[in-house]
Amino acid sequence: MKTKKSLNITLLIFLGLILGILFGLLMPGRYEFMLPVIQLFSGIYMNALQLMIYPLVFCSLIVGIKGIGSVSATGRVGAQTVLYYVCTTLFASLLGLFLPRALGLGNGVTIEMIESNVEATQFTSLLDTVRNLIPANPVAAFADGNMLQVLVFAIIVGITCVALEEKAEPFVRVAESINDISIKIISVVMYFTPLGVFCSIASVVYANGTDTIVALAGVLFALYLTFFLYALIVYGGIVKLIGKCGVREFFSKIMPAALNAFGTCSSSATLPISKRCADELGVPNEISSLSLPMGATINMDAVSILMSFMIVFFANACGVPVSFGMLAVVLLSNTLLSIGTPGVPGGAIASFAALASIAGLPTGVMGVYISVNTLCDMGATCCNVLGDLACSVAMKETVKLENAKPAK
């Protein structure tokens, strides 16, 4: 029954996605009066999803660490998660740089520059991120939506609960209750996901228009094909070889999260749905409660591919020579910047501005990039969420926890 219900939700989300794209194309002129209503429902849906993200992440992580039962086991889960994401991001950056160069993307293309004032992410931002990992004010971390600080605070509290044992039980029970409440609220929101995806994607297509879509169809096709092959080969291989899970089973069960990520362009907002998909795949809460929030924060494989693709495309189109030495610099910078990219819509824009500056591209390319950022971001976010779930499935086999129980 649970599988059948998940399948029905997936089909409805997919239907909402297709109808949203068609409605977004038809909206100009004929149905433009409905745009405020579409944007209203889209905003309500996004707020409803984000409503329980931080209580869910915080409490689920505490419950998960307490369930693991030891500091060393928690460190093992965290270390394997970080290693997985760093390795896949490096590989994605490498693929994103050399594949478009081999295909000659951007050669013979004339780009009309559009000026746009975007403040580039400073290359030292990773150092700032590390320095500010421990929140001076945990309440401000929740209020500002700083996922890294929330994660670190939850880990500190969770480890302390493990050390205090029985003395921490009252607090752990409260965390378990809040976790259950969050999951229940998200379960209700899930029923409105098809409508939310319809409204979100319709707004995106309307804002960009058919002219923009057609003008950059070639590079978008190559980019989406790369996302697809990367997810199928890399994530499918990880799930099959390491996670001991059928590729078809994996992709069928994670479709609700993938489609929601595609429609909302936010891996953070998709976290609650990703958690449900991980539960259906039998990933213990002790693993998914840590790997999924960390993935939404630092796993930016597809963003890495996207930024690398665009750097090479714009360099070729603008006639800017990019040597192999510069490619190596861009590769390292891309990996570091993508890890610091927030899992929200448009989070890659400032990072791309920094990479464009490093590669010596004219500032006018930012206006062109921004005009298609959302179209690119939809596929990138979807691919990133697949990577988060693939990591969780793989760690179900690589991290053996004595007290862990598969999610029901």
Image (tube, rainbow, N blue to C red):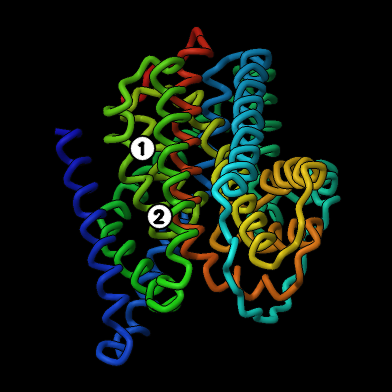
Residue at the location (55% across, 73% down)? 371
Of discs 2 and 1, which sits in the foreground? 2
Q: What type is the residue that disc 1 sits on?
A: Arg
Q: Which mark is residue 41?
A: none
The x, y position of residue 73, in whole percent, is 62, 14
Residue 133 can be seen, yes or no: no
The x, y position of residue 125, in whole percent, is 81, 51
Nearer-the-camera pick, 67 or 33:
33
Tell which residue pokes out farthest to the front in this image.
108
Relative to 9, residue 354 above or below: below
Nearer-the-camera pick, 91 or 361:
361
Residue at the location (77% across, 40% down)? 328
The image quadrant where one finds the N terminus is top left
Report the residue marked by disc 2: 262
Q: Which mark is residue 276?
A: 1
Residue at the location (32% across, 75% down)? 24
The x, y position of residue 375, in whole percent, is 46, 64
Relative to 400, residue 393 above or below: below
Residue at the location (62% across, 36% down)? 89
The image quadrant where one finds the C terminus is top left
Q: Earlier in the sequence, mark 2 or mark 1?
A: 2
The x, y position of residue 243, in whole percent, is 42, 18
Distance between mark 2 and mark 1 Cα atoms: 17 Å
Q: Residue 65 is drawn in which quadrant? A: top right
Residue 223 can be seen, yes or no: yes
Nearer-the-camera pick, 157 or 345:
345
Tag 2 and tag 1, C-beta contact below 8 Å: no
